[in-house]
Image (tube, helix red, strand yellow):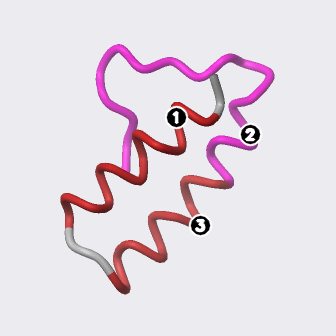
């Protein structure tokens, strides 16, 4: 799932963010609906700030 417009991950955290996002995207697609997947991405992003 792509980041929302206006959300930028600091360059030094980009690789880790992408790794976490791939993991959570896979989990969400198997077990959750789209709304929860979107919340997961926001949570991933906020945890990197």
- Specify the label residue 15 is tagged with: 2
Q: Please tell me which of labels 2 and 1 falls first in the chain.
A: 2
Residue 47 in the image: x percent, y percent?
Answer: 61, 36
Q: Please tell me which of labels 1 and 3 falls first in the chain.
A: 3
At 20% from the left edge and 63% from the top edge, which residue is drawn? Answer: 34
At 21% from the left edge and 72% from the top edge, which residue is drawn? Answer: 33
- Specify the label residue 36 is tagged with: none
Q: How many marks?
A: 3
Mark 1 or 3, closer to the camera = 1
Task: Tell me the quarter of the picture where residue 22 sits.
Answer: bottom right
* Label 3: which secondary element: helix
Crowd class of label 3 (few under 14; some 14 to 19; many from 20; radius 10 Å): few
Q: For mark 1, what is the residue?
A: 45
At 34% from the left edge and 76% from the top edge, which residue is drawn? Answer: 29
Q: Is residue 48 left or right of residue 3?
A: right
Task: Tell me the quarter of the picture where residue 3 sits.
Answer: top left
Residue 7 in the image: x percent, y percent?
Answer: 42, 20
Crowd class of label 2 (few under 14; some 14 to 19; many from 20; radius 10 Å): few
Is 36 part of what is drawn in magenta? no
Is 7 part of what is drawn in magenta? yes
Q: Please tell me which of labels 3 and 2 falls first in the chain.
A: 2
Mark 3 or 2, closer to the camera = 3
At 63% from the left edge and 22% from the top edge, which residue is drawn? Answer: 49
Magenta residues?
1-19
- Compute the Cα span from label 2 to label 1: 12 Å
* Label 2: which secondary element: helix
């Amino acid at each position: 799932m792509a980041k929302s417009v206006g959300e930028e991950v600091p360059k030094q955290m980009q690789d880790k963010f992408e790794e976490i996002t791939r993991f959570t995207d896979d989990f969400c697609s198997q077990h959750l609906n789209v709304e929860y997947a979107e919340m997961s991405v926001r949570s991933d992003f906020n945890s990197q700030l």
